[in-house]
Image (cartoon, rainbow, N blue to C red):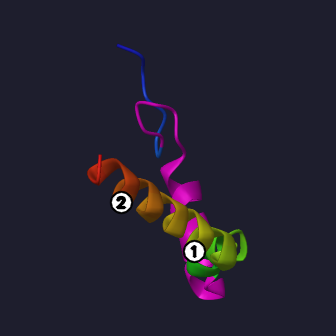
Amino acid sequence: MAKQQPNKTAAGTNAQEVRQQNAQSAQAGQFGTEFAAETNAQQVRQQNAQAEAGKAQNSSK
């Protein structure tokens, strides 16, 4: 088994660095807004409507 360095997981992730990044994003409130900024709400509504229409068509066959 490979010898682990302190503060590193078996996969090689630096746990301290991850904690620091999590703390920074929590302070800036980035987590929720990061995904919201990439989402086009109108496009999602349209896709949902199309999916529902497809379901209705399929169930009536």
- Under circle 1, the secondary element is helix
| Residue 11 magenta | yes
Q: Is residue 20 visible?
A: no
The image shows residue 53, relative to residue 13, as above or below, that is below
Q: Taking the image as drawn, is residue 44 in sight?
A: yes
Q: Nearer the viewer, residue 19 or 6?
A: 19
Count of labels shown? 2
Q: Residue at x 71, y 76 (%)?
A: 37
Which mark, by number, is residue 56?
2
Q: Position of residue 3 (x, y in %)?
A: 42, 21
Q: Name the foreground residue: 22 vs 20.
A: 22
Among numbered discs 1 and 2, the one appearing first in the sequence: 1
Instruction: Name the residue: 52% across, 33% down.
Output: 12
Amino acid at the residue labelled 1: Arg
Towards the viewer: 60 or 53: 60
Instruction: Provide the residue span drawn in magenta.
Output: 8-29
Name the residue beneath numbered marker 1. Answer: 45
User: Residue 39's spot in the image, x, y percent?
Assistant: 66, 71
Above or below: residue 27 compared with residue 11? below
Quarter of the picture containing the N terminus is top left
In the image, taking residue 12 as reference, residue 42 lies left or right, namely right
Instruction: Give the CA separation, mark 1 to mark 2.
Output: 16 Å
Disc 2 secondary structure class = helix
- The image quarter in which residue 38 lies: bottom right
On screen, residue 17 versus residue 54, left or right, reads right
Q: Residue furthest front?
A: 61
